[in-house]
Each structure stands twice: as structure tokens, then as C-alpha cells.
Amino acid sequence: MSRRLDALRALAERPGTPEEGEVARRMLKRLEQRQYHSPAVSLIIEIKGAKGVLSGDENQLVEYMQTVGCSLGLLISPTTTWAFHPGSTPGCENAIERFVEVPTADLLGLPSIPGSDASLESVVRGWLGRLAAGEWPERPEPGPVRSLLIEHIIPAVATGRILSNVRL
């Protein structure tokens, strides 16, 4: 865990922009304060293969996040990744909502996504392994991919347990 937090500290010290540095420092402070109080599962990833995302897949991920008390979920298809977290709507604090949609290749830092389902699974697992080892990717251009990585995925990987499920 400390190796991952050290890598997050390094990311906070070498931001691409002053705003990014401030966000990274705030996240690091919050993570250090909550290090021993984080949920048992901080990130759930559902990988969908060539068949794509079916109508019930989003609901199933949301229900599972609520069941285990997870604060971040990713639904990854070959083309698109959707991210979910507890809502900020007044009166609906326990509801899980989709908050961003990004191209999967951009999130994984690849020019394109491999064609086979097994290759997609392998690429995602390798990406997660590198994040867990503290090997942060090159910063993407400012925008939703970068925000998702720096504000949500990297802190979740740095402080918690990850569950991954592949349903092709």
C-alpha cells in the first residue's frame, strides 16, 4: 500500500497544470486520512466483450456496488467505459449514478483496443496491474479521461481492493 501512496505522492508533486496539482494534493490528503477507513472494495470493474453492454448490465453493476458498499464502478466495453459512483443528488445520497463516459482506448492509453475478448481482458488486467504497482500512465490531455484517472481510479487503486468480472 505504501508503494502505491508513494507513487500517488509523486504524481501530486509533478502535475501537468497547477489545477491538476491541487486536485492531486487534495486527493492524497483525503486518502491519507481515510487510508484505514476505506471500504473493503474500492473499485469494481465489469468487462464486456464483443457482444457489448446489454440492457441489464448497468443495473447489475449498480446493485452490486450498493451491496458491497463500493464507491467506484467501471463498466468496460471494447469501445466505451462508463464510470459510476454514489450520487450527489440531495435526498438520493445512496443512489449510484453514472457520472462519465470515456473511450476505452483513451482510458487504457492505447491507440486501439484488441479485437478478441480475451485480449481485452488481458489488456485491462495488465493496466490494472500497472496501476496497482504504482506505475501511473502518461497523463492524457485535460478532460474527462484525465479527471477519471486522477480523481477516481488512481485513488481507488491506491487504497483499496479491486474486484474484476468478465462476462463476454
Image (cartoon, helix red, strand yellow):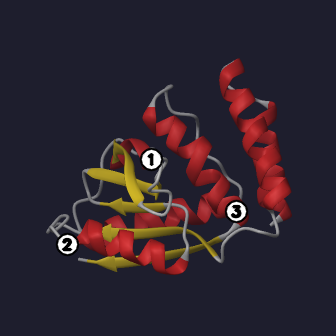
Q: Which mark is residue 56?
A: 2
Q: Residues within 10 Å of mark 2 (few under 14, many from 20)?
A: few
Relative to residue 150, is residue 161 depicted above or below?
Answer: below
Instruction: Categorize mark 1 by other alpha carbons within 10 Å: few (<14), some (14-19), many (20+).
Output: few
159, above or below 148, in the image: below
Q: Which residue is mark 1?
A: 89
103 above or below 60? Answer: above
Kind of element beneath mark 3: loop
Q: Quadrant of residue 110?
A: top left
Q: Residue at x 26, y 57 (%)?
A: 78
**Residue shown at the point (46%, 54%) measured from the top left:** 91
Percent from the top left, x then y, of residue 86? Answer: 49, 57
State the image coordinates of residue 79 (x, y, percent, origin top left): 24, 51
Give the number of the mark in front: 3 or 1: 1
SS at mark 1 in the image: loop
Dot 3, how many residues are within 10 Å of its Cα: few (below 14), some (14-19), or many (20+)?
Answer: some
Q: Quadrant of the N terminus?
A: bottom right
Verify CB contact (< 8 Å) between mark 3 and mark 2: no
User: What's the residue type where badge 1 is placed?
Assistant: Thr
Q: Amino acid at mark 2?
A: Gly
Label number found at residue 59 = none
Marking on residue 133 = 3
Vertical comparison of 109 with 39: above or below: above
As helix, strand or loop, the secondary structure at mark 2 comes to loop
- Mark 3 vs mark 1, CA separation in Å: 35 Å
Going by the numbered disc 3, the residue's amino acid type is Ala
Distance Cα–Cα, label 1 vs label 2? 23 Å
Where is residue 106, by image quadrant? top left
The quarter of the rendered structure image containing the C terminus is: bottom left
Camera-side residue: 54 or 11? 54
The foreground one among 24 and 140 is: 24
